[in-house]
Image: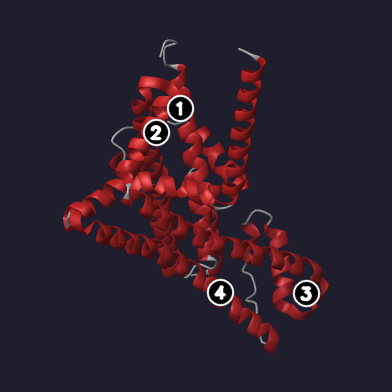
């Protein structure tokens, strides 16, 4: 190779690297949204095809529109219900503070049985006896935590918007799925050779398994929990539902996540029958995954729990709440690709 040829090749590689880097920087702010859109498109494409078959190929746009409206409603309505109670209670509390009419119900003796119960009982009792004095003495702490809660709430609402945007992008992807599928196979074959299509199929199946076997089950458990919390009048129903959602996604036993709401329920309610029914209901919800996973998965999930856990935690740290979903799927996919690569012969 001559010096001139080497220089030309170097310039080409440099320009290509700069273009790739530039493109990566442009896409970086939208990486989480685009990744979730691709995951959604792969996961719900079979449903999209069933709707197309129902309405006819000529009405494919109608099928996409129906799927978008239904999916957005399924996301927006429960989420609105989840946070409307928080917004209403916050607004009422602020108004009561302005009118100097806010009253805090004194704690019962049962609170002392909580972890750190004595400390919680003391602070709660002091606030209920003289709220004005308590707020004055803890002003800095209240303001600091209040700002954090507001910031977290705004972040969650922003995530909801991103989820809806991702869903709309996913439907656009599905509308031209055939061409995109062929394009991905060609790219995969250029990267790994003749096994490219097998790799794409394995990746598709992994995404659908994780979405159905973990994310969908977690959402169902969280939604059922929220319904029960609201019916029985549990305070902070939305926060406890999010706790259950998080536990279910990172594969922690959901039975552990239901312990705090059960403790709170017995602390704020003296109705023994209602408390017992609530306990039975929420325990049943925590165990529903044992029934749903075999139904939704024809085979067992081939991803270790630790991979799911690390993907969820890392996703939250990197992309916020949307990363809870994206990180789980991406790391599970990378694990399956690693297993495929390790078990592939050297010649292939």
Residue sitting at 25 percent across and 62 percent down? 62
* Label 1 residue SS: helix
Label 1 to label 3: alpha-carbon separation: 57 Å
Q: Which residue is mark 2?
A: 203
Q: Quadrant of residue 20?
A: top right
Q: Quadrant of the C terminus?
A: top left
Front residue of 206 and 123 = 206
* Rendered position, 221 above or below 154: above
Residue sitting at 65 percent across and 84 percent down? 96
Q: Which residue is mark 3?
A: 134
Do the residues bearing badges 3 and 2 touch, measured as CB atoms within 8 Å?
A: no
Closer to the N terminus: mark 4 or mark 2? 4
Which of the two marks, 3 or 2, is nearer to us in this view?
A: 2
Label 4 to label 3: alpha-carbon separation: 24 Å
Front residue of 323 and 252 = 323
Residue sitting at 42 percent across and 25 percent down? 190
Do the residues bearing badges 1 and 2 touch, measured as CB atoms within 8 Å?
A: yes
Q: Left or right? Give the position of 28 relative to 97.
A: left
Do the residues bearing badges 1 and 3 touch, measured as CB atoms within 8 Å?
A: no
Which of the two marks, 4 or 2, is nearer to us in this view?
A: 2
Task: Decide: few, some or many residues near mark 3? Use Cα within 10 Å; few <14, some 14-19, many ≥20.
Answer: some
Indicate which disc residue 74 carries. Answer: none
Indicate which disc residue 337 carries. Answer: 1
* Rendered position, 343 above or below 262: above
Task: Decide: few, some or many residues near mark 2? Use Cα within 10 Å; few <14, some 14-19, many ≥20.
Answer: some
Front residue of 241 and 182 = 182
Q: Which residue is mark 4?
A: 87
Closer to the N terminus: mark 1 or mark 2? 2
* Label 3 residue SS: helix
Label 4 to label 1: alpha-carbon separation: 44 Å
Front residue of 262 and 25 = 25
- In this figure, what is the number of numbered marks? 4
């Amino acid at each position: 190779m001559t010096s001139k040829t080497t220089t030309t090749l170097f310039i080409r590689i440099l320009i290509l690297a700069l273009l790739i880097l530039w493109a990566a920087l442009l896409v970086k702010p939208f990486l989480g949204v685009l990744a979730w859109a691709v995951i959604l498109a792969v996961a719900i494409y079979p449903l999209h095809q069933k709707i197309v078959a129902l309405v006819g190929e000529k009405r494919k746009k109608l099928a996409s529109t129906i799927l978008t409206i239904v999916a957005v409603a399924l996301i927006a309505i429960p989420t609105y219900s989840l946070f409307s109670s928080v917004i209403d209670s916050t607004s009422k509390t602020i108004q009561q503070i302005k009118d100097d009419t806010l009253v805090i119900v004194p704690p019962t003796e049962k609170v002392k049985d909580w972890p750190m119960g004595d400390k919680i009982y003391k602070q709660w009792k002091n606030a209920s006896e003289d709220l004005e004095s308590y707020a004055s003495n803890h002003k800095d702490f209240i303001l600091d935590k209040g700002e954090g809660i507001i910031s977290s709430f705004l972040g969650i609402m922003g995530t909801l918007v991103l989820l809806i945007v991702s869903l709309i992008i996913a439907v656009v992807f599905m509308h031209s799925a055939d061409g995109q599928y062929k394009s991905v196979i060609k790219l995969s074959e250029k990267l790994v050779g003749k096994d490219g299509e097998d790799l794409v199929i394995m990746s598709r199946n992994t995404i659908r398994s994780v979405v159905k076997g973990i994310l969908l089950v977690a959402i169902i458990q969280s939604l059922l929990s929220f319904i029960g919390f609201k019916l029985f009048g549990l305070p902070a129903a939305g926060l406890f539902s999010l706790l259950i959602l998080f536990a279910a996604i990172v594969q922690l036993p959901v039975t552990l996540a239901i312990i705090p709401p059960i403790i709170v329920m017995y602390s704020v309610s003296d109705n023994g029958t209602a408390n017992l029914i609530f306990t039975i209901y929420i325990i049943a919800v925590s165990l529903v995954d044992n029934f749903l996973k075999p139904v939704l998965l024809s085979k067992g999930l081939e991803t270790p729990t630790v991979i799911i856990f690390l993907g969820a935690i890392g996703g939250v740290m990197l992309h916020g709440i949307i990363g809870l979903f994206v990180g789980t799927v991406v790391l599970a996919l990378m694990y399956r690709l690693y297993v495929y690569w390790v078990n592939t012969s050297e010649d292939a």
